[in-house]
Image (cartoon, helix red, strand yellow):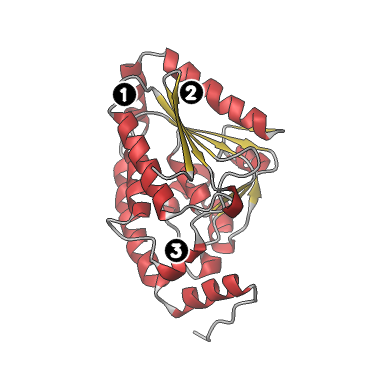
């Protein structure tokens, strides 16, 4: 397990804390693998009733480490990213997210697979895939319009527009927004502890029923998105967008 993750098992709750502050918790391949491994282990551990995914009180995650995009394609079946996404899509125990500060790219799309999401008022959720010459991932092209409606989803996905935690809560992308990072984490912990007090079989069945039909479709669409994502990642638009990002300049795209 990488030291970029902090794993805690206490009070029947698994808490996964992204711990890479020098990179604003940018997700490395090792972090994806570690989170997937921890969540799968929790599914088979009867002493654990719920899973919390969080960053710090200042930052959830700045998304996929851009150097991975440039040096090693992060997507595709068998990759750590794909494994993590499939794991959270198929998780049977409740997933709870505590979101402070930036939640970029997969930092927002992973929330669509969580059962409860608590955010800070000033958290910033964004999915800038188009800005990078890419396309939605994690079945967000299906789950996001279903959750907040086509128009709002198009605004976020086509414009890559960031929204605050408060707006996310107003739109139904989060349960509640709080004034401080500590309050966000306390809310997630309180929800997880409440779940831990409830009959585990009933909780798991209820989650399965809530997600029936949706989970299967999401997994299928995730595969399709992944194929397009991998193809776009090798294309000229993504290469230019990613190079411009790293070089801190405005990208220049060829005429289509």
Q: Residue 214: in sight, yes or no?
A: no
Counting residues from the start of the chain, the first of labels 1 and 3 encountered is 3
**Which one is closest to the eye, mark 2 or mark 1?**
2
Q: Where is residue 182 in the image (x, y as percent from the top left)?
A: 66, 30
Q: Which residue does the image show at 70% across and 33% down from the upper left?
A: 180
> In the depicted view, which residue is nearer to us: 21 or 198?
21
- What separation in Å lies between label 1 and label 3 (alpha carbons)? 37 Å
Q: Residue 13 in the image: state x and y as whole percent.
A: 44, 24
Q: Which SS class for mark 1?
A: helix
Alpha carbon distance from label 2 to label 3: 33 Å
Vertical arrangement, residue 120 with respect to residue 66, above or below: above
Q: Can residue 162 be seen in this view?
A: yes
Q: What element carries label 3?
A: helix
Residue 105 is situated, as x and y percent measured from the top left of the image, at: 52, 55
Q: Residues within 10 Å of mark 2 (few under 14, many from 20)?
A: many
Picture quadrant where residue 208 is located: top left
Residue where numbered disc 3 is placed: 68
Label 2 – label 1 distance at C-alpha: 17 Å
Count numbered badges in the picture: 3
Residue under the point 64% across and 45% down: 101
Residue 35 as seen in the image, left or right of residue 189: left
Residue 82, image x and y in percent? Answer: 34, 53
Q: Mark 2 points at which residue?
A: 192
24 or 83: nearer the viewer: 24
State the residue position of label 1. Answer: 205
Residue in the picture at 66% in, 34% down: 181
Instruction: Tell me the SS state at disc 2.
Output: helix
Please tell me which residue lies in front, 116 or 76. 76
Work out whether 118 lies above or below 30: above
Q: Dot 3, crowdedness within 10 Å: few (<14), some or many (≥20)?
A: some
- Identify which residue is drawn at 38% across, 43% down: 34
């Amino acid at each position: 397990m990488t030291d970029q993750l902090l794993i805690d098992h206490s009070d029947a709750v698994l808490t996964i804390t992204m711990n890479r502050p020098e990179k604003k918790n940018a997700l490395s391949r090792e972090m994806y693998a570690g989170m997937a491994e921890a969540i799968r282990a929790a599914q088979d551990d009867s002493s654990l009733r719920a899973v919390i995914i969080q960053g710090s009180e200042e930052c959830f995650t700045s998304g996929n480490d851009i150097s991975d995009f440039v040096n090693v394609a992060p997507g595709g079946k068998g990759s750590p990213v794909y494994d993590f996404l499939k794991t959270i899509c198929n998780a049977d125990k409740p997933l709870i997210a505590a979101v402070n500060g930036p939640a970029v790219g997969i930092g927002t799309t992973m929330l669509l697979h969580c059962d409860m999401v608590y955010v800070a008022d000033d958290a910033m959720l964004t999915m800038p895939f188009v800005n990078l010459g890419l396309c939605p991932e994690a079945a967000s092209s299906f789950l996001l319009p279903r959750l907040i409606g086509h128009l709002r989803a198009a605004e976020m996905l086509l414009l890559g527009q960031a929204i605050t935690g408060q707006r996310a809560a107003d739109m139904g992308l989060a349960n509640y927004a709080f004034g401080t990072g500590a309050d966000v984490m306390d809310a997630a912990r309180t929800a997880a502890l409440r779940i831990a007090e409830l009959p585990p079989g009933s909780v798991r069945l209820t989650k399965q029923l809530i997600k029936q039909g949706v989970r299967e479709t999401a997994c299928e669409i995730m595969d399709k998105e992944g194929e397009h994502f991998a193809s776009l990642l090798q294309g000229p638009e993504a290469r230019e967008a990613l190079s411009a990002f790293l070089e801190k300049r405005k990208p220049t795209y060829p005429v289509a």
